[in-house]
Image (cartoon, rainbow, N blue to C red):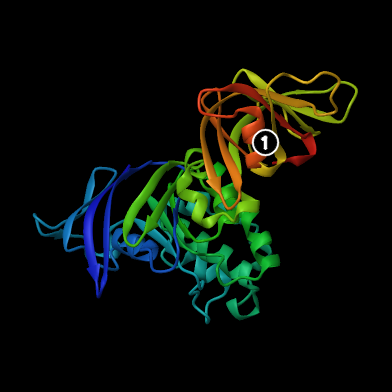
Amino acid sequence: MLELDFTQTLGTHRLRVEANLPASGITAIFGVSGAGKTSLINAVGGLTRPQQGRIVLNERVLNDTEKKICLPPEKRRIGYVFQDARLFPHYKVLGNLRYGMAKSMAGQFDRLVALLGIEPLLDRLPGSLSGGEKQRVAIGRALLTAPELLLLDEPLASLDIPRKRELLPYLQRLAREINIPMLYVSHSLDEILHLADKVMVLEAGEVKAFGNLEDIWGSRVMNPWLPPEQQSSVLKVSVLEHHPHYAMTALALGDQHLWVNKLDSPLQTALRIRIQASDVSLVLQPPVNSSIRNILRAKVAQCYDDQGQVEVQLEVGSRTLWARISPWARDELGIKPGLWLYAQIKSVSITT
């Protein structure tokens, strides 16, 4: 576990963080430029020193201002991947990977190289690599130091869209197969949606929200970053069954289910889906003879007026689902907090 309770001032910027981050998975640090994202991981990595407070990693004290403890970066057992790969230009990829490699990682070298897909690159110099290839090598080099925590400071920011798409699957695979917690700094909603297990939202140096991706994404705190037409819900589901006759797959959502276009995934596979609020329609009674396959029983939690439309926050079991409707529809259906109704979602509108 990473325990954060510190205050740091750099020039006119003040950062105040108090949170306990998990010892596994990817925690995204999200916010606009100047929110304090990089300052946070620099403090964790030992590149800057908080003026007050403590930073503790797996019960090892990294910073404690009262006890005057401040471990240097090389003593923290933390890997750091920057926006630019910062590879040694005169070393081939193999030399870069072995530089600083912990003895305990020698047996993991081949597996990690395969996991990152960099075996064909081992005899090449960094100058001959694409941006995405350089970042994969930089991530491998950081992991081979046997860190207890990996910090990634917008590792895709300098890449074009094709290179970003190339690197994302490798990061997803690492998150599944490498048991090292990661702090992932980004201001890209798409990256966070694909990678994060938990999200910390920073605003002007303060923690605005922290929790599971699904909970934070479904909260009002994300509204400033999501244009009205992109308001959406992110839900954890699992593969329930594949239809015997039609190219459709059922996904379990609590004690209800959703049908989507057929997925090539085994039963019980955990997935994350996204549903646009504008693709959710509401009815007071379950429809008869409808082409819409997904009809969920839901309870209205809140209604918010937003730029001439109404954002309806629904409770589907313990999950949050958003619908975007017109004021006319709200008034005609009498939609208000506490009302039970049905949410209709077309199968083709659900993205995985």
Q: Is residue 271 above or below residue 56?
A: above
Q: Quadrant of residue 76?
A: bottom left
Q: Is residue 276 visible?
A: no
Residue 31, given in percent of the width and then of the height, sits at 44, 59
Residue 67, given in percent of the width and then of the height, sits at 9, 55
Quick one: label 1, few (<14), some, or many (20+) residues within 10 Å? some
Q: Residue furthest right?
A: 245
Residue at figure coordinates x 13%, y 58% from the top left: 65
Question: Which residue position is annotated with label 1?
Answer: 329
Residue at figure coordinates x 77%, y 34% from the top left: 346
- Relative horizontal placement of residue 315, taking residue 117 as reference (left or right): left
Q: Is residue 238 above or below residue 85?
A: above
Work out which quarter of the rendered image holds the C terminus and state it.
top right
Residue at figure coordinates x 57%, y 72% from the top left: 158
Q: Is residue 193 above or below residue 244?
A: below
Residue at figure coordinates x 69%, y 64% from the top left: 120
Q: Nearer the viewer, residue 158 or 76?
A: 158
Work out which quarter of the rendered image holds the N terminus and state it.
top left
Q: Quadrant of residue 11?
A: bottom left
- Relative horizontal placement of residue 21, taking residue 278 as reference (left or right): left
The secondary element bearing badge 1 is classed as: helix
Q: Is residue 69 visible?
A: yes
Q: Nearer the viewer, residue 314 or 92?
A: 314
Q: Nearer the viewer, residue 275 or 36?
A: 275
Given the image, on which type of amino acid does mark 1 rest? Ala
Residue 50, given in percent of the width and then of the height, sits at 21, 62
- Relative horizontal placement of residue 138, taking residue 260 as reference (left or right): left
Q: Nearer the viewer, residue 132 or 322?
A: 322
Residue 96, given in percent of the width and then of the height, sits at 51, 70
